[in-house]
Structures are given as structure tokens and as C-alpha cells.
Image (cartoon, rainbow, N blue to C red):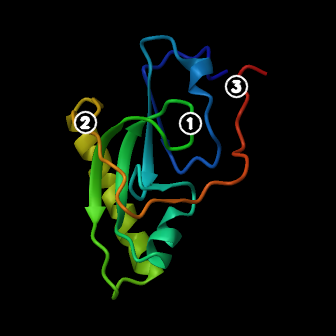
Amino acid sequence: MLHDMGYELLISNGCPYLLPVYQLYTGARKFINIHLTLLPEQRGPHAVNGATLYQYGAGAICHIMDGGADTGPVISRVDIPYSPDLDLGMLYQLSFTTEVDAFTIAEARHFRPLDTPPQAGAKSICFLRQRMAELDLLA
């Protein structure tokens, strides 16, 4: 089981489930998520679509997982400013590239949160399901 394995760092990228890190936390483990789009403004699995729909910038972040849906402290953030000539397909491709950049920056920071967390802008969008599917790792 994931709980019993010996690891110090768990990295999630594109996982469609809410991982119950509170079941796995031992004090020595770090749980990191790479999120396609920006936090805290754009939460949820369809935030790139929302960025296009609402003419909002996009990008990627790396954050510490805290058990919520895209709610943990941000470690790194790479922005893509809004441009009307970026269609959804191109924005996804650019965002995937920024995921690599966000992870590289976070790794260089030894996965420490930013001293000044990003603040939600005037336009904040959230595309979460009514109930996020959560894994039970102890069952």
C-alpha cells in the first residue's frame, strides 16, 4: 500500500482524484501537485478551458498538497498572459510546457512555499465537480 511504502516525496501531475494526504502524512513526507493553470485563481480539472472562456491568463503552478482540491501553499508559478490569438489547443500546449518550468523552479527551491503567496485576481474561476472523487488508501 502507498501508506506503507518508504518514500519522502510524492508528486502528482494530472491525477483525476483527490489524494487523501492526511492518511499518508508521516511528518517526513512531502506531497506535491503540478497544476495546469494558476492558483489560487483557477482551480479544478477544466481551468484551462475557463481561462480561454473568460479571457484570463493561464500557466502552471507547483503546490503542496493539503487534502483540499488545489488549495495548498504555492511553491512556484509560471504565468502565460492572456492573448486573443491563443486558441484552446495552443493554450493547452503552452501550459504543458509551463508545467515543466514550474516543477523545475519548485525543485530548485527544494519544494519550499513562496514567501508571498499569489493572491486571487479580480477574476477567479473554479471548475470543480460537485464532489471530487477521493481515493481511500487505507481500505
**Left or right: residue 3 compared with residue 96:** right
Q: Which mark is drawn over residue 114?
A: 2
**Left or right: residue 101 compared with residue 39:** left
How packed mark 3 is, by other alpha carbons closer than 10 Å (few <14, some 14-19, many 20 or more), is few
Q: Which secondary structure lies at badge 3? A: loop
Closer to the chain start, of discs 1 and 3, is 1
Q: Please tell me which residue is depicted at 26% across the width and 45% down the height of the picture.
A: 104
Q: Please tell me which residue is depicted at 34% across the width and 86% down the height of the picture.
A: 84
- Badge nearest the viewer, 3 or 2: 2
Q: Please tell me which residue is depicted at 42% across the width and 46% down the height of the picture.
A: 34
Where is mark 1, residue-wise? 68
Query: Which image quarter is the N terminus in?
Result: top right
Q: Can you give x and y, in whole percent of width and height, for residue 3 in the image?
A: 62, 18
Looking at the image, the residue that sits furthest to the front is 122
Type of the residue with mark 3 = Leu
Q: Which secondary structure lies at badge 2? A: loop
